[in-house]
Structure formats: C-alpha cells, structure tokens
Image (cartoon, rainbow, N blue to C red):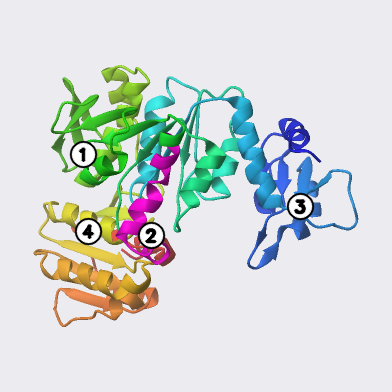
C-alpha cells in the first residue's frame, strides 16, 4: 500500500498507537518490535481493543482486512509522520540539549497555548518513536507544534529533524549527558548541533542564548537568529532577579515570579519568553504564561511533607545537572539539609570519574548531610562522617525506616533508573 493511501486511512482514525495496553478507540496501531517482544503478536489484540487498523510487517494469522502489511512498521510510522507533517504544513518548534529539554518545552507550551492551538510532546516521548507519535497527534486545527528531541548517539537528532522538519529550533545547553554514546563532551556538542545544521540548511530560525559562548560558536555567522541575553542588547533581554525560594526574572518593566527553583531554570524560562516574544505576545501575556506553569513529574518539584520541604528532582541526572542542582541547594536557608543522590547512568568510561567529582563537591559543601545511593557512588565511599553510602535502594530504605527526619530541607536527585521518588514514602 502506498504511503498516501495509509495516510488517508490514518485520517479516518483518532490517533496513532504502539501499545496495546493503552489503545484508544478508532486508533491506528503500529506493530513495533523490541528486544523482548514482537508487536505483530499483538495485532489481533489491538483490533479487539478498539484500533481501527493495524500496521504489521509480518503475516499474521488469521488474516484480517483491517491489517496493513508493510515492509517495516517502524519505518512506516516515521515516514507517515513526515508525510503528515508535510500535509499539515504548520510551523514546528524543535528543541534539544543536555539538560532542561522537557522543562523548557513545557514552559514554551505554557506561554503559547493560551493564544494558539498548540500540540507539544507529551512527557519525554522524544525519540525515534516518540517524535513521530507527537507529529501524528497534530491535526488540521493545530497552529504550532512543539517537538522535543532526545538522543544518546550521533546522527539521531539529524534523523529526527528529517522527520519533523522544524522551522524554529533551540538547544538548551551542551553538558555531560549520555557520554557513553557520544564519546566525549565534544561529541555531545557535535550531536546536539545537528539541529543547528538542519536549520541552517533549510533557512530555519535559531533561538540563541547569546550569553552561552558554546552556542554562539556553533551558530557561527548564520544570521537567521532570534536572541536573548541577560547582559547585552539582543532581541529579548531577560534578567535574573532571585532564585530563592523560587526563580524570579525581569522582562522589560515586568517582574515574573515562577514556580521553578534554581538559577539553572533561568535560561529555560528566558528561552520560553523569547519564543513567545517572537510570536508577538505582549509582556503581560508572557508573564501570565510563565507564571501559570507548575512543575510536575518529579522535575524540580517543591513538596511540603509534614515538617520537611522536599525538592524532588528525580526524573533524571547527569554530571552537569547534578552540579547545578547542588549549587542551588547550597543557597537554601535551613540549618538541617539532606541531599539524597542516586547513580548517574550512560557515562561509559567516565562513570567513575564523574561520580567521584560529585562526591568531592559534596565534601566541600558545608551544612548538608549526603546520602549516596547506588553501586557507582558506593565505589567512591569515603570516611567523611557527613557522607553516607548505600549500595542499593533497599539499604537506604532500611536506614530511612530507622531514622526520623523533621524540619529538614531534602534534595532528591538521580537518574531515572534509580526511581528515587520512592524516597517520598520513607520520609
């Protein structure tokens, strides 16, 4: 079946789906394969659960007229997403970076959605499957699409750009993330800059943080840019006012009080304000948009639990985000502070070095007790009395169940695989 024919069938459906556990009625199911499953085995179940059609890449018995047989279901999903994006012809904002992608995406969405019919990546569905699904969730009613792009290897951002074909792009930063796949920090810069490469080749607009020398160097003499800065005259000037208890920024004569914590969220907020300004929103509209956003999903959430104030930032971690989180935590005024830090993953040969650097940062931090969790941190165990090391989460759990924590500020941060949000039940 030709791609345009599949697209016509897709337009009859409500949504695209790849998971039979969450099938929506009247959806188009794609039978994707994984390391431990074959999506074709679930094609019948998808139809029984309400899918209108199922795209398969193996012959399934018994046959069904609602099956669409293709050579490769994943490739068809990606090609269909690109076809649909061409069909809609709407502006697409793409963003990537080492840290802050999802928060920045949510802030951009919060700023734009009161004034435009926007569709944005749900959660962090930002890979070779999530990006196509995001594009296929857009309709003829959508006015602006916001697409988050993640990667842990070179050429992934380039591939996602070929699918999404962004008109506007922003890179949050270049940091120490996914070093195992990128090989080095230089590898991170090169891979993330594939978004810039696409925009330059297609006369797209780059949203640029003029205060970030690495970003400026990567953009070079390309002049289709819309810039922001705290220190110099640019398209948009945003200034940091305060970081405690929450981040506050100044835009022209307006003070914007966010629900975000830490100076590390300044650029995320500034980028969202800049994109909103590019789409001609007023300072008041920009202020209302940023102030409406409340963090969720374990990202920089402030939680009051009994007498404790908890900063839950347990969605993910890498050396760069860990460093700025600890710097922010230093500024919290409380005589009792505990930082519960979990292992950082996907660091390859840099794993031991980067975990040791975090431990050394903790040693030099005054007025805080540290609980390190996981085998990588456990390998860096020291005799410093304010540093406690737990090889497994169960070891930490046993300790917390035998302890009383009260009137304390608690930072919880670690890679997603550590699932440190479980600590909330123990404090």
Which image quadrant is residue 15 in? top right
Residue on which the image places disc 2: 421
* Percent x, y of residue 89: 57, 25
Q: Nearer the viewer, mark 3 or mark 1?
A: 3
Quick check: marks 1 and 4 in contact, CB under 8 Å? no
How crowded is the residue under tag 1: few (<14 C-alpha within 10 Å), some, or many (20+)?
A: many
Residue on which the image places disc 1: 247
Magenta span of residues: 179-199
Residue on which the image places disc 4: 323
Please say whether residue 401 is visible from this viewpoint.
no
Quick check: marks 2 and 1 in contact, CB under 8 Å? no
* Percent x, y of residue 408: 19, 59
Main SS of the magenta part reads helix
Q: CA distance from mark 3 to mark 4?
A: 46 Å
- Residue 194 located within the stretch drawn in magenta: yes
Nearest to N terminus: mark 3 or mark 1: 3
């Amino acid at each position: 079946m030709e791609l345009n024919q599949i697209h016509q069938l897709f337009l009859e459906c409500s949504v695209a789906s790849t998971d039979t556990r969450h099938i929506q009625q009247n959806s188009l199911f794609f039978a994707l394969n994984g390391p431990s499953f074959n999506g074709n085995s679930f094609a019948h179940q998808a139809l029984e659960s309400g899918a209108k059609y199922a795209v398969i890449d193996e012959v399934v018995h018994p046959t069904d007229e609602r099956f669409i047989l293709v050579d490769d279901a994943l490739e068809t999903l990606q090609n269909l997403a690109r076809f649909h994006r061409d069909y809609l012809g709407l502006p697409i904002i793409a963003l990537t970076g080492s840290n802050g992608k999802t928060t920045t995406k949510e802030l951009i969405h919060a700023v734009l959605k009161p004034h435009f019919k926007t569709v944005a990546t749900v959660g962090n569905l930002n890979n070779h499957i999530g990006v196509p699904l995001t594009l296929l969730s857009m309709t003829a009613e959508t006015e602006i699409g916001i697409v988050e792009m993640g990667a842990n290897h070179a050429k992934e951002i380039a591939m996602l750009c070929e699918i999404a074909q962004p008109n506007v792009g922003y890179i949050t930063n270049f940091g120490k993330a996914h070093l195992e796949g990128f090989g080095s920090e230089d590898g991170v810069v090169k891979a993330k800059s594939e978004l810039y490469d696409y925009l330059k080749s297609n006369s797209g607009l780059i949203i640029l943080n003029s205060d970030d020398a690495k970003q400026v160097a990567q953009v070079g003499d390309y002049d289709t840019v819309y810039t922001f800065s705290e220190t110099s005259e640019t398209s948009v000037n945003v200034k940091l006012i305060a970081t405690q208890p929450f981040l506050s920024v100044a835009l022209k004569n307006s003070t914007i009080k966010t629900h975000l914590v830490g100076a590390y969220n300044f650029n995320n907020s500034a980028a969202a304000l800049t994109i909103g300004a590019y789409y001609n929103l007023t300072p008041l509209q920009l202020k209302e948009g940023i102030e409406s956003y409340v963090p969720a999903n374990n990202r920089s959430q402030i939680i009051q639990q009994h007498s404790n104030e908890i900063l839950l930032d347990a969605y993910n971690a890498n050396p760069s985000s860990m460093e700025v989180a600890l710097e922010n935590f230093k500024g919290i005024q409380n005589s009792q502070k505990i930082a519960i830090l979990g292992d950082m993953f996907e660091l390859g040969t840099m794993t031991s070095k980067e975990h040791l650097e975090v431990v050394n940062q903790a040693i030099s931090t005054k007025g805080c007790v540290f609980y390190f969790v996981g085998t990588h941190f456990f390998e860096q165990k020291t005799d410093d009395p304010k540093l406690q090391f737990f090889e497994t989460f169960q070891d930490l759990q046993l300790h917390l169940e035998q302890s009383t924590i009260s009137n304390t500020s608690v930072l919880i941060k670690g890679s997603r695989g550590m699932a440190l949000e479980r600590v909330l039940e123990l404090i």
